[in-house]
Amino acid sequence: MEYISTRNSSKIFNFKEVFIKGLAEDGGLFIPKRLNKYTKAEIDSFKKLSYQDLAKKIICPFIGDFMSENDLSKIIDKSYSVFREKNVVKLVKVGDRSVLELFHGPTLAFKDVAMQLLGNFYEYYLNNENEKINIVVATSGDTGAAAIDAIKGKKNVNIFVLHPHNRVSPVQRKLMTIGKDANVFNIAIEGNFDDCQNLVKLMFADKIFSNEIKMSGVNSINWARIIAQSVYYFYSYYLVEGDKRPINFSVPTGNFGDIYAGYLAKKMGLPIDKLIVATNQNDILHRAISNGNYEVEKVTETISPSMDIQIASNFERLIYDLTDENDEKTIIAMQDIKEKGDYKIDQKKLDKIKLNFLSSRMSEEEVLKTIKSVYEKFDIVLDPHSAIGYGAFDKVNLSGNNIVLATAHPCKFPEAIKNSINLKADLPDELMFIMDEKEKYDIIDNNVDKVKQHIKERI
């Protein structure tokens, strides 16, 4: 499979370049030049596969000659052997909809599904190429822990994780900062997640710096994460496929990555009807989809911190589609967002969006009420992000097989759970130890030169 950048459709890349670079040198995001669509017969033929074997089928066409099918098979089996569920994810009926639990990996968040795979991809690459690289990643709470767990202790690779100081939950932070591995570095930035993400983008854009440190990235813009996440859309479809009603997914999302993976699955032929973009009150994506107003506002701190984002990086991939795959128009749109903080989506593009996407927004009070209601009716505790996904189906009237992506274990947000249902959401037994461990992280100003210097001193 050949890849291009959303900002240059003439230059061709292979999967290895796409995976290692993460972000294109022109600032664009990588996408396949052409996408193969499965026939209904092919999709039906995958039905009896285990999660691991399904992942092998879906991922293999994307990676070209990066590795053999046999090596890919071994890496997928190894990556998913650390999950608490045999088939990685679990579908639970909760009232009139189903909840797809994606948090059975080592750091209790959906990010583990892709990140465990990426960690083993890096190890494979570095062993074969005899290279050293430095991964630099921004996190709004969950990506960092998942990336660290996947990379810690591996040879020839360091990982630097930037998180917004005092803006992630204590459990989220501890899952990142208690490690003792020499190749893991945590940086708390005096700012919000968008500041962290912007610092990483600035470092990528500085060619001298990024080449000097052999910089790589595992944020949700990394195409390898998107393809890994598309697998659970297929898998959950097979779990409800006996019911012939249309299938809809509600996805709590801030950076547009997880829901873009669903959009990719639909483009590959999976018969998804609608994808609901479920947001908290930092609702730039809801405003964009409901009225065409992609306008950056101030980030508000909420009880769903992983969605406290205003610049949804993966949205650029959708903008490229909306401009009829025109790289020049995409560049203009992204310049408007960067310079004016604003991008107007006209009616024709909005109509195109609404063929695939709907959206909803929830206030803090509504999130707490949803957690309480689900607990009282069904004796199930949802974390605040998953509650936003669940509540979206109450705001958007869709009949069919409605599936909510549950993106994190409730124990990661104990204060929100206590405030809602006066219950202590405990960590799984095997992770209880983290609360007593000593943390290690450095607090740095929101200043790209200071962050670069900090990284250089540690490699």
Image (cartoon, rainbow, N blue to C red):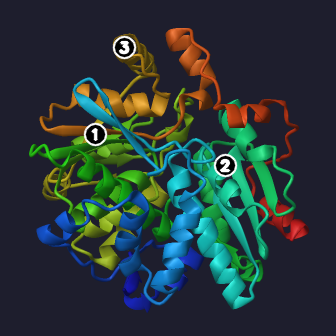
Side (left or right) of 189 relative to 40: right
Which residue in the structure is indicated by mark 3? 373
Q: Which image quadrant: the N terminus?
A: bottom left
Q: CA distance from mark 2 to mark 3?
A: 30 Å
Above or below, comparing residue 99 to residue 206 in the picture: above
Q: CA distance from mark 2 to mark 1?
A: 26 Å
Task: Give, as a three-letter code, the residue at label 3.
Answer: Ser
Q: Residue at x 43, y 47 (%)?
A: 89
Task: Give, as a three-letter code, the residue at label 1.
Answer: Ile
Q: CA distance from mark 3 to mark 1?
A: 18 Å
The part of the image, by quadrant, that contains residue 261 is bottom left
Confirm whether residue 348 shows in the render: yes
Confirm whether residue 166 shows in the render: no
Which residue occupies the foreground of this view, 110 or 384? 110
Which residue in the structure is indicated by mark 1? 403
Which residue occupies the foreground of this view, 394 or 456? 394
Q: Position of residue 239 (x, y in %)?
A: 27, 47
Q: Position of residue 312 (x, y in %)?
A: 45, 52
Disc 3: CA contacts within 10 A as few (<14), some (14-19) or many (>=20): some
Q: Residue at x 35, y 70 (%)?
A: 58
Disc 2: CA contacts within 10 A as few (<14), some (14-19) or many (>=20): many
Q: Which image quadrant: the C terminus?
A: bottom right
Q: Residue at x 40, y 78 (%)?
A: 60
